[in-house]
Image (cartoon, rainbow, N blue to C red):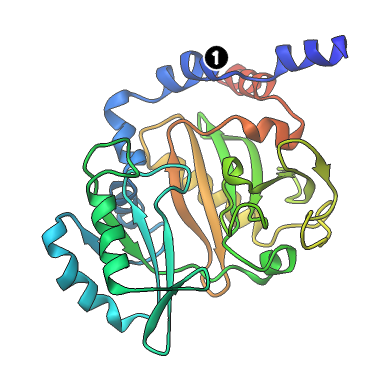
Amino acid sequence: MLNKLRKIKSEFLGINQRNVGYVFPSNPRKHYKMADDKILAKEVLEQHQIPCAKTYAVIEKVGDIPQVWDALQQYDKLAIKPANGSGGEGIKILYKRDEAWYSGGDLVTPDQIHLHLASIIMGFFSFGSSDRVLIEECIVPHTCFHDIYPAGVADIRIIIYQEHIALGMLRVPTDKSDGKANLHQGGLGIGIDIDTGQMTLGYDGQLYHAEHPDSKAPIAGVRLPFWEEILALSLKTAHHFPLKYLGVDIVIDQVKGPMIMEVNVRPGLGIQMVNKKGLKPILQSINNLKK
């Protein structure tokens, strides 16, 4: 046990070490908003023809909600997001059935939708500051993710430092996470072998699993599709952002393939536990390449 603790201390990066050693020196604060604001980030992605979900609307004022919502009735499925939200808070997926809108199987009224949009603008999901609403196309998850867990949208997190890939993981929804893949909301983190694209074990915050804890679908040894494209797309994204330490989140659409979901200035450190591998030696080896 003592040797294990020593290994963790010597190899695993803590929050303060991450911030002081990598985030602050690598990412000028003036550029944080370019990644933190999903709308600004999408403008960079679109400028450089990097695939991402199509934007249907941006709402900045509460008074604009009724008119914009009426214009959105042409679609059958929508993703509503706070531009500056984090951790999946405030995100709502809506789909239409018999001219009515539903979210997670529950009927939602126009008044409820308007209230949610207004709550985003008033900053309920962005630390109290006013925000904007991003409404975009819904991703249709690739069948490989449906085989693992049929609900929600799984995503791939890649951490990049100095335009070199450090670690990667797949985040998959669970029964506990209510369709969301975020680890702190109960999603399952699955380690990925960067060289092969094969999944290793799933980590639920306490235990490791060779299969999904709810669906019982096998995880260990299964190779992700489009792996080379995913790595290339993450590096291309990092190249076009003025950040040298970042997390790139990627989804795989059934029709369009790999697409960038968002960019993170301060990617979480749970990816280390998921992979049973600390970031310290990896980042140090990348630094050594620069010498």
Residue shown at the point (62%, 19%) measured from the top left = 13
Where's the C terminus, which quadrant? Answer: top right
- Indicate left or right for 225 with 14 as reference: right
Q: Which of 95/19 is in front?
A: 95
- Indicate left or right for 170 with 163 as reference: right
At which x and y percent is residue 217? 81, 62
Classify 10 Å Cα crowding around label 1: few (below 14), some (14-19), many (20 and above).
few
At which x and y percent is residue 133? 27, 56
Residue shown at the point (63%, 33%) measured from the top left = 270
Residue shown at the point (72%, 42%) measured from the top left = 204
Where's the N terminus, which quadrant? Answer: top right
Q: Quadrant of residue 9?
A: top right
Q: Which residue is mark 1?
A: 17
Residue shown at the point (35%, 39%) measured from the top left = 36
Q: Which of 248/63 is in front?
A: 63
Q: Quadrant of residue 207?
A: top right
At which x and y percent is residue 120? 29, 51
